[in-house]
Amino acid sequence: MTKLCVIGAGVSGILLILLLQQSKQIPLDQLTVIDPFFDGGDLARKWGSVISNTPWSKTTDAFARFLPSVALPQWATHLPPNLPTPLSVIAQLCRELFTPVMSKVTVVQGLVEEAELNGKTWSISVRKNAAIHVLQSSHVVFTQGSSAKTLDLPIPSIPLEIALNPTLIRQYVKPDQTVILFGTRHSGTLIIKNLVDCSANPITAFYKGTTPFQFARDGVYDGIKLDAATIADTIIANTYPSVKCIPISDISTLIRESKRADWAIYAIGFEPREYTIKKDGVIVPSPLKNSYDGLTGVCQALTHAWGFGIAYPNQAPDGKNWDVGIYSFLEHMNGQIPSILSSIGTT
């Protein structure tokens, strides 16, 4: 039995392992990391072509502040600090930093199907090919990532990761095909530009709220910025006549556009990947929805369990929004390391 099991080796799982390594207060051979791929997570597999909405300097500043013991590869220090990068670059950085650590922790490649807490011991069932392996740990951290939300509409849909890729989306959308898009935040705005470049016509983007675009420059906490803001300004200026932005409350237009749409795309957020979680044989409802503390990462309905990353984002200072991103993940997890280590040390 190990002391701590980290479920998920995407960006947040890797950053957590690096923080624990830096602390030097837990033997790395007492850490188990479970992941199906160990390739950098969704940032590498799905979202690599998406341009970050923050400059590269914010990523390097986060490492300098919270992981000063980690030396960045030379290539990472030579990128333009004031420009954003594709998310694949961030995934590459995390993967390279994690590679030398992998030989020091217990690595289990497989897909978690169930995590059960019996007393003070966690049993994690992992599917490796056709076999199920059960691992035990006294503590667990969920960093399994999230999947894009969708709606149940009778319209062929394009996966979000395809819609955000300016090359792959052309394999779906042909000139003058009709597309409806749900969501006009950062991802949705980037998708509109991809659809324009595919010559889709018309493109109807449905949005919540009073305006289609909310900008960071106007003081909106998680408002769009950089490339997304530039695209939004172009749309507002009516540069793209094929694009219509309609409030989701306009039911008549929603029904009419849905009936003639060739494709639907959903850029409406993410929901945690879930698997069965039990406590003493009884299934526990989603920890995120019922007992997750966004300030500490603690899953309160369980014992010795935390959640981090996009599946378990930390609550923003305003108490309304949720923070995601390398800097936010590192800042939040770094603040919880003492309590995690204290819990491990007392059991």
Image (cartoon, rainbow, N blue to C red):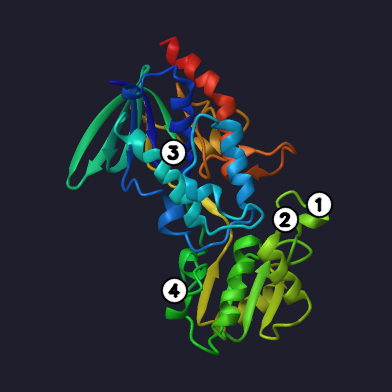
Q: Is residue 314 above or below residue 224?
A: above
What distance separates the C-alpha of mark 4 from that of mark 2?
A: 27 Å
Residue 96 found in image quarter: top left
The amino acid at mark 2 is: Gly
- Give neighbour class at mark 4: few <14, some 14-19, many 20+ (Cα, 10 Å): few
Question: Label 3 neighbourhood size at 10 Å, few (<14), some (14-19), many (20+)?
Answer: many
Give the x, y percent position of residue 220: 77, 52
Q: Residue most toward the top?
A: 346
Q: CA distance from mark 1 to mark 3?
A: 32 Å
* Amino acid tagged 4: Leu
- Residue located at (56% from left, 54% from top): 79
Residue 75, relative to residue 336: is it above or below?
below
Residue at 55%, 90% (x, y): give it: 176
Specify which label sits upstream in the sequence, 4 or 3. 3
| Secondary structure of residue under mark 1 | loop
Ranked by sequence position, the earlier of labels 1 and 3 is: 3
Q: How far apart are the two marked residues, 2 and 3, measured between alpha carbons?
A: 27 Å
Rendered position, 56 above or below 239: above
Residue topped by disc 3: 14
- Amino acid under disc 3: Ile
Circles 2 and 3: CB distance less than 8 Å? no
Q: Pointer 4 and pointer 2: residues touching (CB < 8 Å)? A: no
Cβ–Cβ under 8 Å for marks 1 and 2: yes
Q: Report the amino acid beneath label 1.
A: Gly
- The disc label shown at residue 219, or none: 1
User: Residue at image x 45%, y 75%?
Assistant: 156
* Disc with the residue nearer the chain's start (1 vs 4): 4
Q: Distance from label 1 to label 4 (Cα)?
A: 34 Å
Q: In 3D space, how far apart are the residues under numbered discs 1 and 2 (Cα atoms)? A: 8 Å
